[in-house]
Amino acid sequence: MHAENNGTLYETLATGPFIFAGPCALESFELALETAHAVKEAALAHGLTAVFKSSYDKANRTSLDGFRGPGLAKGLEWLARIKEATGLPVVTDIHEPEQAVHVAEVADVLQIPAFLCRQTSLLLAAANTGRVVNVKKGQFVAPWDMKPALDKLFSTGNRRILLTERGASFGYNNLVVDFRSLPIMQGFGVPVVFDATHSVQLPGGQGASSGGDRRFVPHLARAAVAAGVNGVFLECHPDPDKALCDGPNSWPLDKLDALLADLSTLWNITYAC
């Protein structure tokens, strides 16, 4: 169990504001480290807590040919080195119950992908590690239907749980955001995160991969902060057009500072209300 250190982190996240930020997948150690340093610098400049995010294996890519990442062993090694070099906590996703104990040795936050948010064995395995667990609400799930998932997690005695809104399916290859979901899920007594980059995704919109429209990331992020969200999730990349995963909806790293400046200003207003 990793309860002691994670209790402190969870308290920090619960009081907010914070960001989860980094590239969709671990493309290379150098790119990930560059991104992590930039995330830390921008967050510190605007008084935000930062958690570095990236995936060692994108097991839910649209196509078999889609880039998945370096795999569990190498990916965890990279994340451990990034954590040591930057001092940032890290969040990464798990797709199978057996991965939980291994990932918990490195990651401070275990993330449950949206497509897997109802998988009981996966939820229990993540919560039983004692780590903070971030569950992404499925695109097919109503906000009030996340309460049973939360109850599964709470059954382990671990109450260090976050819920993330990442858009709802709207017909084919499109997502919309119902911002009512933020206060609804906060009503369950847990901090809520808004995924501003996956919410502008166009699932499967490019045939063999997902599309997206990153122009709308700032608009949705600002709306979520104004609505009182605790944290914002942002996939960012030094060159999104060349990213190996989720490039169309990733935010350019050189524009991260300006975006966080806007969000920090809004958070200061909402926290004062």
Image (tube, rainbow, N blue to C red):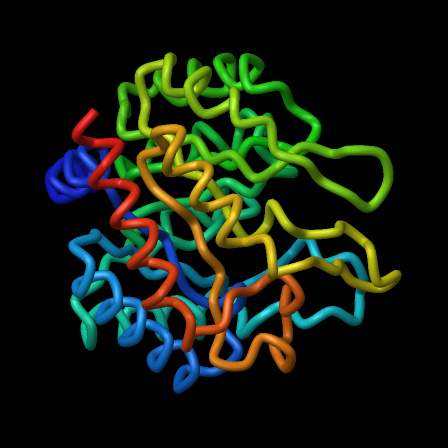
**Residue 65 located left or right of residue 26:** right
Q: In which quarter of the view is residue 54 placed?
A: bottom left
Asked whether the viewer can see residue 1, the reply is: no
Residue under the point 17% across and 36% down: 3
Q: Quadrant of the N terminus?
A: top left
Residue name at image x 63 percent, y 69 percent: 247
Where's residue 22, x and y in %?
42, 65
Is 112 on the left-hand or right-hand side of 156?
Answer: right
Residue 147 visible in the snapshot: yes
Viewer-side residue, 49 vs 261: 261
Q: Is residue 203 left or right of residue 255?
A: right
Q: Is residue 255 above or below residue 225?
A: below
From the top left corner, tell me how far across and down residue 181 is, in percent: 51, 22
Query: Which residue occupies 24% across, 42% down?
Result: 17
**Residue 80 percent coordinates (x, y):** 28, 69
Question: Which quadrant of the view contains residue 114?
Answer: top right
The front one of 44 and 157 is: 44
- Nearest the viewer among 73 and 20 is 20
**193 vs 191: above or below:** below
> Residue 57: horizontal and vertical position, in percent?
56, 62
Query: In the displayed structure, would residue 96 be above or below residue 67?
Result: above
Please determine whether, in this image, residue 34 is positioned above or below residue 103: below
Which of 18/131 is in front? 18
Q: Quadrant of the C terminus?
A: top left
